[in-house]
């Protein structure tokens, strides 16, 4: 797969089939992921691949509680706004995301693979492992495997999750997040985002970027200079 296709079409895939991901596919995904950079090349990271249905069920209970807490706190304002004007485009997009989040919650035990990621506290930081996690998602995309980054476990249930996965916390390992993986039920598409000239500047904050991008540049499109 062309790299730009992977960059443009690797989206949050939360609706996935329970089909197992073959070991050779998992090996290619992980082997690509660990090519990613880390600060000072410490590679002070560890990954736990979870495919045990009992463990997934146990983690799924925590995921449900965590997403419920997010809904009541982090997302409370957006939930209220969406209830008032569900057809407004931003609200409609938020409601679609929420519905896919809850689909994942309801089917967590059937998710075929979870890639939990850890860094050693004090030496590395989350920033040192996110490139590897995103590389895993891109490599999975190239294999036709959908994925979504999740932080609900480490944000709300860090120690409980580590206990379930038998992580040696006394060695200062810290969970940074988990990527859920599986073959998607839906189709791949380009992720809609705020346009680049609305979020990027040149030289100083707020100064015009010098070009505008009205539509995604993959597949190939012309860039307008401004
Ligand atoms: C740091 C980070 C944390 C995230 N945490 C969660 C999560 O806990 N649960 C979840 O369902 N999605 C989570 N996501 C996925 C985002 O919601 C998703 O990437 C975003 O909505 C864009 O989706 P799209 O690429 O399909 O447009 C997380 C993404 C990132 C980068």
Image: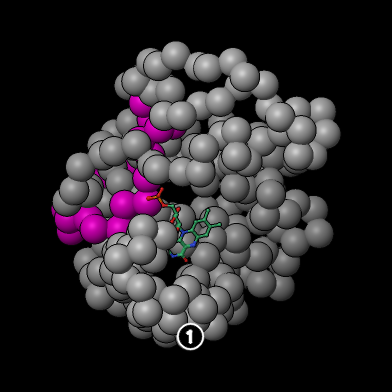
Residue depicted at 76% across the width and 33% down the height? 207
Numbered-mark total? 1
Q: Is 144 or 75 nearer to us in this picture?
A: 75
Residue depicted at 75% across the width and 51% down the height? 124
Residue depicted at 71% across the width and 58% down the height? 120
Is the C terminus in the top left, top right, bottom left or bottom right quadrant? top right
Name the image quarter holding residue 108: bottom left
Give SS at disc 1: helix
Residue 35 position (above or below residue 84): above
- Residue 42: percent from left, percent from top: 74, 41
- Residue 179: percent from left, percent from top: 43, 55
Q: Which residues are magenta?
A: 5-26
Q: Is residue 19 left or right of residue 108?
A: left
The colour scheme used here is one colour
Q: Which residue is mark 1?
A: 72
Residue 6 lies within the magenta run: yes
């Amino acid at each position: 797969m062309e790299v730009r296709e992977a960059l443009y079409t690797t989206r949050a895939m939360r609706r996935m089939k329970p089909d197992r991901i073959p070991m050779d596919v998992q090996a290619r995904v992980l082997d690509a992921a660990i090519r990613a950079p880390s600060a000072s090349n410490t590679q002070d990271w560890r990954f736990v691949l979870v495919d045990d249905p009992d463990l997934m069920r146990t983690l799924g209970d925590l995921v449900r509680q965590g997403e419920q807490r997010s809904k009541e706190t982090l997302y409370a304002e957006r939930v209220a706004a969406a209830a008032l004007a569900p057809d407004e485009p931003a609200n409609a997009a938020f409601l679609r995301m929420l519905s896919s989040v809850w689909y994942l919650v309801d089917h967590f035990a059937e998710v075929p693979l979870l890639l939990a990621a850890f860094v050693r506290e004090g030496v590395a930081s989350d920033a040192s492992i996110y490139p590897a996690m995103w590389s895993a998602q891109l490599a999975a995309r190239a294999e036709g495997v959908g994925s979504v980054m999740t932080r609900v476990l480490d944000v709300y249930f860090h120690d409980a999750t580590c206990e379930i996965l038998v992580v040696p916390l006394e060695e200062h390992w810290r969970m940074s997040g988990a990527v859920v993986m599986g073959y998607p039920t839906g189709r791949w598409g380009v992720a809609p985002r705020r346009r680049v000239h609305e979020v990027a500047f040149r030289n100083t904050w707020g100064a015009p970027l010098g070009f505008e991008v009205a539509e995604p540049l993959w597949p190939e499109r012309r860039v307008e200079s401004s």
